[in-house]
Image: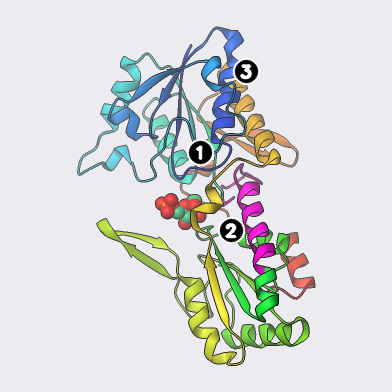
Amino acid sequence: MRVGILTGGGDCPGLNAVIRAVVLSLQAGGHEFVGIERGYLGLIERRLRPLSPELVHDLLDEGGTLLGTHNRCDPFAWQGRDASGEALACLQEAGIEVLVAIGGDGTLTLTERFGRLGLRAVGVPKTIDNDIVGNERSFGFDSAVAVVGNALASLKTTARSHGRVMIVETMGRDAGWIALEGGLAGGADAILIPERPFDLDALAGQLGERVARQGYALVCVAEGATANGSAQHWKQLPGGVARLGGIGQALVDALGPRLPQTEVRHTLLGHLQRGGAPTTFDRVLATRFGVAAAQAITDGVFGITIALQGDRCVRLPLAEVAGRSRPVPADHELLRVAGALGVISS
Ligand code: F6P
């Protein structure tokens, strides 16, 4: 069988490990592999290249994606036209009989839509945000959490030396997973996530008390978090694109007058959270996902995505996952842990 592989959406540590695992675990079956460059855009622009075990065997710990990616290419609405037919024609002409689509909710949603047009595909969930429905842990998330935890630990020395409140703004879109787990890993004194809107005066009181007690305070805030009654912070970028971000600076502005004796500063971690090598956990998880996708192909099971549930890789219909996201549930244990430490509001 000729197997196409693409990576879509934002890059994340572990993508290459999935590609490697798919190719290495299917190679004995005599399959051929075609890499599609820059996600679904590669099918419109016909950017294909052969993949082989020799090309991928060394990719386990390499960040980014060998194939490149694109996070805004929707073939059903691309540059003013429906290019989905062109994408399907490209697959057919290249003799690609099954597609492994590695991506976040956007890519999985597109894959489900192509599936309804006859494409045989297997999805692999990817996102540092950890917000894919039915999937308890995405590869890339652990690597992002490590960046946040280590950043908070590093900032603590400056916070302590200068008696400051230091704020770290994380990614995560509408889900608080990165800030919650990263904040716990880095010993944050306050964790602010979209699922728990916060009260500014209460936060200032809590931080003032921490500064009085320990001489400094650390805040870990998710980009999608909001103060009670306020909207999310968005940045307008050239080309009419808007991205979440700016809550860290907004907190500096709001907390400054409430904590007049204490300097409040912020650090935006940005794409550092998606960069570099995957952690060992993510290398293993990505490898498991790749092998599970290969097994689905061998079994002739399509229209599904791989997901982690408990300690097992399972198959979920793409239709169950498409167009949905997974916030931190109100009864999640990490919320109870953060609550017990007094670092998250109830
Ligand atoms: O979905 C992953 C993510 O990293 C989000 O956490 C973040 O909001 C977004 O992508 C940033 O995307 P970009 O790379 O386009 O700035």
Label 2 within 8 A of ligand 1 by Cβ: no
Residue at (60, 90) in percent of width and height:
259
Q: Is residue 241 magenta?
A: no
Q: Which amino acid is tagged 2?
A: Pro
Question: Gap between marks 3 and 1, in whole Å?
Answer: 21 Å
In the rendered image, which quarter is residue 157 located in?
A: bottom right
Residue at (26, 41) in percent of width and height:
78
Q: Is residue 221 above or below residue 53?
A: below
Considering the numbered disc 2 on the image, is that residue within a helix, a strand or a loop? loop
Can the viewer see residue 330? no
Circle 2 residue: 327
Q: Which amino acid is tagged 1?
A: Gly
Residue at (59, 31) in percent of width and height:
17
Q: Is residue 130 magenta?
A: yes
Which numbered disc covers residue 25? Answer: 3
Residues in magenta, as a range: 129-155
The color scheme shown is rainbow
Which numbered disc covers residue 64? Answer: 1
Residue at (44, 40) in percent of width and height:
107
Q: Please tell me which of labels 3 and 2 falls first in the chain.
A: 3
Front residue (pair 192, 118): 192
Q: How packed is label 3: few (under 14 Cα within 10 Å), some, or many (20 or more)?
A: some
